[in-house]
Image (cartoon, grey):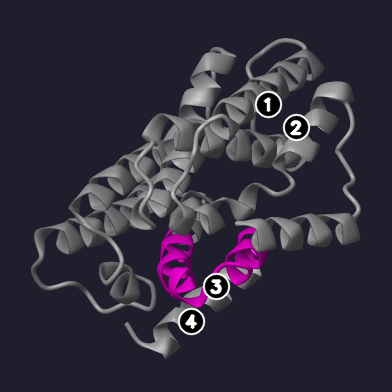
Amino acid sequence: MTDAEVSACAGLVARGDPDRFRAVMAAPVDLRRRLFPLYAFNLEVARAPWVTKEPLIAEMRLQWWRDALAEIGSDGAVRRHEVVTPLAAVLDAQATRDLDDLIEARRADIEGWSFASSVELTRYIDRTAGTLLWTAARLAGASDAPAIRDAGLAHGISAWLRAVPDLVAKGRHPLPSGEAEAHIAALAETGLAALDRFRQARQPTQARPVFLVLSDTRAELRAFAANPGTQPRLNPLVSRLRLGWRAVMS
């Protein structure tokens, strides 16, 4: 994996996922080389169902990434691609299997969602955001899957609730039927409980920088729980200071 390949992945993340980009840049350099390809992959997969209005084309895009993961997991020839090539240097067989399930979960984005309950929605968030954080942490040396998936769930719920107004404006139904504010408050409490469980677990030192992405998660979830009808407005300076402090302490 060359520096140019890592830089290309970093550029994709900087443009498409600035929160994760800032968190990764606060991590040690050797960890950045693993996280940027992984997060660039996640970004490309998340975009796939949205770049076309044709469900069949969206399915083909997701299948392309599943095929790429299968090549990486088989230890055979891997297609040349600005994300796939460096990703192949990062993933192991378990990661390819876990990320394949992440892609499968993203098929719901094509179908437009119809979450029957908050349980069904949190399952979707666990399979996407939970799987992503678990993979990142495991590749950095962590092994406590339940606690790390809890952290990913909390982070994913926060991101999902931030996206609700935009998703509604696009004609999507990101929440189960019923009172939206009640669902938002309940989801925020679910995320806070998951974050509390994660905080009770100890993580290996080398994996701790992976969790810098969580620096604003508790504050956002508390804001959603207290005022579910309002999007939280965190002070950017406070966010940078919080991230910096966590980076120093990790």
Amino acid type, callout 3: Leu
Q: Nearer the viewer, mark 4 or mark 1?
A: 1
- Of pointers 4 and 1, the one earlier in the residue sequence: 4
Q: Report whether 158 appears left or right of 89.
A: right
Q: Which residue is mark 4?
A: 8
Q: Tag on residue 12?
A: 3
With respect to residue 161, does 245 lie above or below? below
Q: Residues within 10 Å of mark 3 (few under 14, many from 20)?
A: many
Residue type at tag 1: Leu
Label 1 environment density (alpha carbons within 10 Å; few <14, some 14–19, many ≥20): many
Q: Residue 75 occupies which quadrant of the picture?
A: bottom left
For mark 3, give the secondary structure. Answer: helix
Q: Which residue lies under the disc numbered 1?
A: 192
Q: Residue at x 75, y 59 (%)?
A: 245
| Distance of label 3 from label 4 (alpha carbons) | 6 Å
Q: Residues within 10 Å of mark 4 (few under 14, many from 20)?
A: some
Q: Is residue 124 above or below residue 107?
A: above
Q: Which range is magenta?
A: 16-41
Which numbered disc, 1 or 3, marks the residue that appears first in the sequence? 3
The residue beneath circle 2 is 221
